[in-house]
Image (cartoon, rainbow, N blue to C red):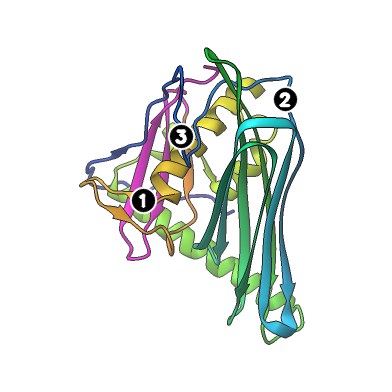
Amino acid sequence: MKKIVLVLGVSIIVILFFTIHQYKNPKVQESITYFPIDPKVSFKTAHTSITVNKSANTILWKEQSTLDRKAYLRQDAALLYANGRLIDELWNWKQNTAVIEQEKRIRMDKNVLLEAITFHHAELHENENQIFSSQAMSSDQTFFLSNTDDDENVKNQLKQQMERMLQLSWNKGLRHFSINLSNYQAFPLSEFNVLAKESLPGFTKEETSAIVGNLWEGLYKNYILGIKKAEGALENPKGSTLPLILIATDKTHLLVLTETALGEPILLRQMMAAGD
């Protein structure tokens, strides 16, 4: 991804993302809640794929994850972007299982660069007072070319057009909210998803896990289920731009910057308590 250019502007209200609470007896619901990571638990598989069926002008989008044991609650949340804009979401939750599987066949009618991003999560109850998490991430990227034979020029054009659109969108948001980019590490969500599998720059693996879990809790509640706007209204996330994740260099907070399908800049803010 090309370097993000900072442009300053007028500040307006920012939406607060969420705060982390631990519940003694949480109600089961279709949601993702971050709890401290249990190092004894791991995902045996965590996979996302996009398979192109050119003759039928369709793609098959799939995600699957298997924990090494049954969990009190399993949740997966998946996002699919075409040329940098959200075109679909998948999410599911089940109790007392290790496995989540989801798939969707989607018709394509134009050349696109597709990016699929999935967060796999498990909530584990050792007893009524101790709740832990396990999590993993997976992704896939491919081109759907309807009228060409894997033409490299078309692929390069699609990539350049997407990067240019995202740069303009993010710069518009930075301007809109008067964000000084020099105070942040900036990662498109697709890159953040890959980088955070190990550790983010300047953070330990444990701190990174906490940041990732907290981030996806907020993304699920405030983006996937509907973009929460400052006045309390909900906006359908479809058509929104790939979020830019901004991690404060002083490690106090992170920001999620996106733009709705109608071009409205949206900023979600999350206080960071890495390692909690």
- Residue extent of the magenta highlight: 249-276
Question: Can you tell which of label 1 and label 3 is closer to the viewer?
Answer: 1
Which residue is found at the position 45% from the left and 17% from the top?
A: 24
Residue 210 location (% of width, % of height): 56, 25
In the picture shown, does residue 199 fall above or below 90? above
Label 3's element? strand
Task: Give the Cα separation between the discs numbered 3 and 2.
Answer: 32 Å
In the picture shown, does residue 125 fall above or below 151? above
Residue 146 shows in this picture:
yes
Residue 202 shows in this picture:
no
16 horizontally vs 170: left or right:
left
- Residue denoted by label 3: 184
Of the residues under marks 3 and 2, which one precedes in the sequence?
2
Residue 227 is labelled as 1
Tag 3 and tag 2, C-beta contact below 8 Å: no
Of the residues under marks 1 and 3, which one precedes in the sequence?
3
Find the residue positioned furthest to the front.
Answer: 96
Badge 1 local density, few (<14 within 10 Å), some, or many (20+)? Answer: many
